[in-house]
Amino acid sequence: MTTNINLLSSADVFLENDIVRLERSVFPADIQLGAAEWSAERQGHHDAFLLVLNFALKQVMDCLDNYEIWLLTGDSSWQADTRIVRYRKRFNSLKMQGIDFEAISDRGESMIEKGGKLKFFGAVRLDASVFSTVSLTMIPGACTYIVVKPKSDPWEFPLSAGWAGKWNDDAQMIAAIAAIGGIAFQRFGFFDDPEVGLIAIGRPDLLERIVRHVP
């Protein structure tokens, strides 16, 4: 069965639109942000999201030369401060769940402490060979983004500050990504939702160029 992938775009995420509405007050006053959406109906396909993920990222990379893809992954809840938790950190914890990025050397992680509890955040550079592994990190409530950014830009991910995994709560990080010409992606569609897909936030002109691109 052929899976059709649908595309939508919006030039302003702070106005009413069919993708996502962000809170104007929590973002820098001078920033302009658009949105794009890639979606597919489940129709019994357990891999429908992976099909969307592969399609969207291929479309992005076909349009954007000298860009790289990163996965931002973090703990959504605080963990007890134990020796084993400190040892595992973020990527070893994922490996214990069968989600292994160990073969990729270009990665980093950091720990945050608060009230005797711990959270870990990590970033790992991706290639197409691990996209199926990436999809395993994008579960309900996950503190996960995919970010496409220019290779030459020195801006670093805020590992020591972390992120919440929600657009409005992470306004500062999303704005910083857009400011360097980057794009942030998140999954939508879980449980019994009839559609699954990716929402991207970035500069409106950049997103429109990608959405209009025909592979």
Image (tube, rainbow, N blue to C red):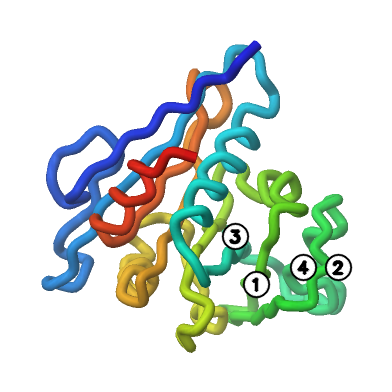
In the rendered image, which residue does mark 2 sit on? 103
Of tags 4 and 3, which is closer to the observer? 4
Relative horizontal placement of residue 6, taking residue 72 as reference (left or right): left
The spot of residue 107 in percent (x, y) is 71, 76
**Quick one: SS at disc 1?**
strand
Of tags 1 and 2, which is closer to the observer? 2
Q: Could you tell which of marks 3 and 1 lies nearer the N-terminus?
A: 3
The spot of residue 28 in percent (x, y) is 19, 73
Say which amino acid is labelled 1. Answer: Gly
In the rendered image, which residue does mark 3 sit on? 77
The spot of residue 51 in percent (x, y) is 62, 33
Which quadrant of the view contains residue 190?
top right
> Height in image: 32 above or below 82?
above
Q: Could you tell which of marks 1 and 2 lies nearer the N-terminus?
A: 2
Q: Residue at x 65, y 11 (%)?
A: 1
Say which amino acid is labelled 2. Answer: Ala
Residue 72 in view of the camera: no
* CB atoms of marks 1 and 4 within 8 Å: yes
Q: Nearer the viewer, residue 203 or 85?
A: 203
Q: Could you tell which of marks 2 and 3 lies nearer the N-terminus?
A: 3
The spot of residue 180 in percent (x, y) is 36, 76
CA gap, disc 2 and disc 4: 11 Å
Say which amino acid is labelled 3. Answer: Ser
> Height in image: 203 above or below 50?
below
In the rendered image, which residue does mark 1 sit on? 122
CA gap, disc 1 and disc 4: 7 Å
CA gap, disc 4 and disc 3: 16 Å
Q: Could you tell which of marks 4 and 3 lies nearer the N-terminus?
A: 3
Of tags 2 and 4, which is closer to the observer? 2
In the rendered image, which residue does mark 4 sit on? 91
